[in-house]
Amino acid sequence: MVKVGILAIGSELLEGSIVDTNSAWLGSKLTKAGFNVDDVRLIPDDREKIVTTMKEALEKYDIVLTTGGLGPTFDDITAEAMAEATGVELEMCEEARQHMIKRLQKYGVTIKESHERQALLPKGCLIFPNVSGTAMGFAMEQNGNVIASMPGVPYEMYNMFDNHVLPFLLERHSLKERISIDVRIGGLPESDIDDVVIDMNLPEEVECIINVAKGECLVKFRGFDKAQIEKCAEHVAKAFPKNFVGYGDDGLASVLIRLLKEKKMTISVAESCTGVMIGKELTEISGSSEVFMGGIISYSNEAKERLLRVPHNIMVLYGAVSVETAKAMAVGVANQLRTQCSIAVTGIAGPGGGTEEKPVGTICLAYSVNNEVTTKKYEYMGDRDAIRTRAMKTALREMIDLLK
């Protein structure tokens, strides 16, 4: 078992101005490759803390990966911290220097003396090319363990890791690729799925993780026996035939797009409280333009009347947040965009706007399929983001059920 520690460096990560997505991405890649990620830490731009953490990590883990702190500014101190942690001096790396100068000149940047410090790297380090940015990556060995540093800019780090760092690590460690299958279950509480998983009596070599994400559960099976992992995933999928969405990235939107293509039907959406969320999910799927004709964001009552032809008296009698208005929205968008199917959503996502009769979390949905309209009303718990996300996922899942 090869243990890995990940250090995300940068004060901006701890104060929340930038979210650390690099560590999650690296964890996924490393896990699949057969490594074990044992620790992820956020470290501020403090030399003493970085050095101390690097030394501790090198004693505990076979591999230490860091992201961030490789630029030319005063707070980019990862290179000097690694040099101190591994007991070597900094030296000017001419390869890194020339690479930096070439990249900066390409974009018309005047080379300053301060840029030079970006090419000061630990003496004797291994260099990793950066085809997307100015900062080279580098690695050092300490008592048989490896510490490697990569840029914090995600697209730079992704390319460097895939093409240089991961192959380097796999040369040092012969590992069997870990098999991973995710099962997507919609519209059920985590406890229902947990009961099924417990009854399966999983073998020790199979890892199962259940993630809950606002209206959808992701059941993750991990292991090295492909047949065994496939059997576990299939068991959970069959246990919830009405709620099974798909495997892996085969989410609600992709399932809906596939169904529409099979039935040769088109769809449109009318969104109020969800903004563009349903439309965004659908357009994330390559080829969705074959069946998704577009959407109308009718946030105001005026937009509902003018763009969707919702009768004024419906909103006067029942309110903008009502199944009656949702139904009129669904009919209106299907007519306006000339589609066989449509989804409409209106609601109160909060934090304000709720009443005793219609509290925050009230969501009204409508679905039109060949001029037959179905409506639903829900009251969701959670903050604004959670309510909107649940509404979006419910809308996709229930349209799938109707088409099935």
Image: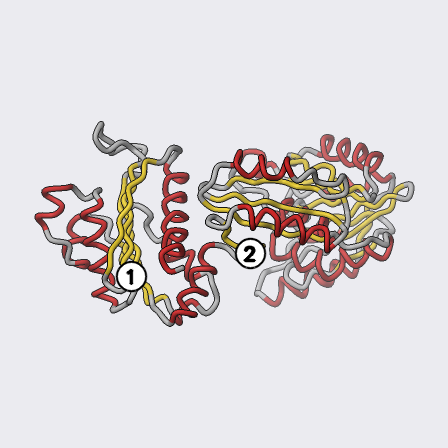
Query: Three-letter amino acid code at disc 1?
Result: Val
Q: Amino acid at mark 2?
A: Asp
Residue linked to disc 1: 369
Q: Secondary structure at mark 2?
A: loop
Mark 1–mark 2 Cα distance, whole angstroms, equals: 26 Å
Query: Does residue 97 lie above or below 57 as drawn?
Result: below
Q: Is residue 224 left or right of residue 42?
A: right
Q: Residue furthest right?
A: 143
Question: Is residue 261 rendered to the left or right of residue 346?
Answer: right
Q: Residue at x 30, y 56 (%)?
A: 343
Q: Residues within 10 Å of mark 1 (few under 14, many from 20)?
A: many
Q: Nearer the viewer, residue 262 or 38?
A: 262
Residue 80 shows in the view: no
Structural crowding at the residue carrying mark 2, measured as other residues with C-alpha within 10 Å and reported as few (<14), some (14–19) or many (≥20): few
Q: Residue at x 80, y 32 (%)?
A: 56
Rendered residue at 27%/31% (across/down): 359
Residue 382's x, y, as percent?
Answer: 40, 33
Q: Which residue is mark 2?
A: 249
Q: Quadrant of residue 135?
A: bottom right
The quadrant in which the C terminus is found is: bottom left
Residue 61 point in image, percent of width and height? 81, 38
* Local SS, label 1: strand
